[in-house]
Image (cartoon, helix red, strand yellow):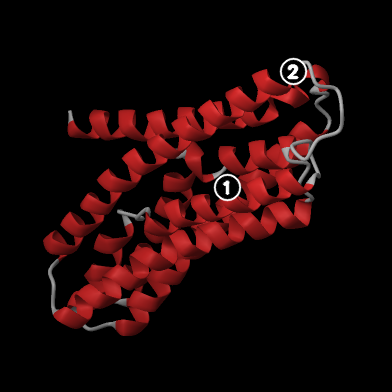
C-alpha cells in the first residue's frame, strides 16, 4: 500500500461494504428470523445458526481469494469464478425455497383437520429433524454463496504484497458482515417475539417458505437489475 492512510480508507470501505451488502440482501437475515419465530428457536440457537452460516459465507470467498493469490490469478478471473458461483446459488436457493414451500403447504393442508399431537408440531421429533435438515441446507447455500465485493478489496493490497493489509481488509469485511447479520436477526427476533401469530402456527412453515422464496426472487431480480 502507498500509505497507512490508504490502508485505513480501504479498511473503512471494506467494513462499509460488508454492512451494505448484508443489509441490502434480505436473504442474510429474514430466513433466520422466520425459522426462529415459527420453529420456536431459542435466541442462543438462532445466533449460533446465523454465525455458522455467516462465517461459512465469508470464509468460502476468502478461500477462493487465497487460492487465486497462490495461483497468481488476476482479479478478473476470480470475479468470474465468484460470478459463476453466484449464478448457481441463486437458482439453487430458488429451487430449495419452492420445494420447502410446496412441502409446507402440503403438510398444512393434510393436517388442518387433525387436532391430535403430531411429530410435525413445534418441538416434536419430526420438527427437530426438519429444522436440522433446513439448517444444513441453508448452511450449504451460504457456504457456496459468494461475497462478490470482497475479492477486489483484498486484491488491491495483495497487488503490492501487503499481506497485513490483505488480512486487515478481510477481517474488516468479515466482521462487518457477521455483526450486521447478528444485529439484524436479533432485532427481528425480539421484534417478532411480541407478535401473536395465533392461528397462523399451522402455516408457520409455509410462511417461512414464502420468506425463502421472496428472498430468492429478490436475489434474481437484483441480478437482472445489475445486468441492465
Compare residues 171 and 95 and report the one nearer the observer.
95
Query: Does residue 110 appear to the left or right of 139 in the view shown?
Result: right
Quadrant in which residue 152 is drawn: bottom left
Q: Please say whether residue 1 is visible from this viewpoint.
A: no
Quadrant in which residue 163 is drawn: bottom left
In front of the other: label 1 or label 2?
2
Give the percent coordinates (x, y) of residue 182: 63, 53
Which of the two labelled residues, at mark 1 and mark 2, occupies the earlier sequence position?
A: 2
| Residue 134 tag number | 1
Look at the numbered disc 1 and give the secondary structure of its residue: helix
Residue occupying image coordinates x 52% and y 58%: 54
Compare residues 95 and 29 and report the one nearer the observer.
95
User: Which residue is under mark 2?
Assistant: 112
Q: Is residue 17 above or below residue 65?
A: above
For label 2, count other residues whose C-alpha is less than 10 Å away and answer few (under 14), some (14-19) or many (20+).
Answer: few
Q: Please say whether residue 17 is visible from this viewpoint.
A: yes
Q: Is residue 32 above or below residue 224?
A: below
Query: Does residue 117 appear to the left or right of 212 in the view shown?
Result: right
Look at the numbered disc 2 and give the secondary structure of its residue: loop
Give the percent coordinates (x, y) of residue 95: 39, 36
**Where does the C terminus fall, quadrant-wise?**
top left
Residue occupying image coordinates x 67% and y 60%: 48
Amino acid at each position: 500500500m502507498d500509505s497507512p492512510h490508504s490502508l485505513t480508507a480501504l479498511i473503512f470501505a471494506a467494513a462499509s461494504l460488508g454492512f451494505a451488502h448484508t443489509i441490502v440482501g434480505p436473504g442474510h437475515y429474514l430466513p433466520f428470523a422466520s425459522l426462529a419465530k415459527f420453529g420456536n428457536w431459542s435466541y442462543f440457537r438462532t445466533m449460533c445458526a446465523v454465525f455458522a452460516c455467516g462465517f461459512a459465507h465469508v470464509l468460502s470467498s476468502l478461500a477462493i481469494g487465497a487460492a487465486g493469490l497462490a495461483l497468481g490469478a488476476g482479479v478478473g478471473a476470480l470475479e468470474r469464478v465468484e460470478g459463476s458461483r453466484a449464478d448457481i446459488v441463486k437458482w439453487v436457493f430458488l429451487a430449495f425455497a419452492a420445494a420447502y414451500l410446496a412441502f409446507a403447504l402440503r403438510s398444512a393442508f393434510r393436517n388442518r383437520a387433525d387436532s391430535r399431537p403430531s411429530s410435525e408440531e413445534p418441538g416434536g421429533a419430526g420438527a427437530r429433524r426438519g429444522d436440522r435438515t433446513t439448517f444444513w441446507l441453508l448452511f450449504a447455500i451460504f457456504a457456496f454463496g459468494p461475497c462478490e465485493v470482497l475479492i477486489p478489496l483484498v486484491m488491491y493490497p495483495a497487488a503490492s504484497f501487503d499481506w497485513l493489509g490483505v488480512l486487515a481488509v478481510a477481517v474488516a469485511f468479515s466482521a462487518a458482515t457477521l455483526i450486521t447479520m447478528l444485529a439484524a436477526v436479533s432485532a427481528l427476533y425480539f421484534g417478532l417475539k411480541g407478535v401473536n401469530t395465533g392461528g397462523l402456527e399451522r402455516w408457520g412453515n409455509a410462511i417461512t417458505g414464502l420468506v425463502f422464496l421472496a428472498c430468492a426472487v429478490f436475489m434474481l431480480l437484483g441480478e437482472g437489475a445489475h445486468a441492465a
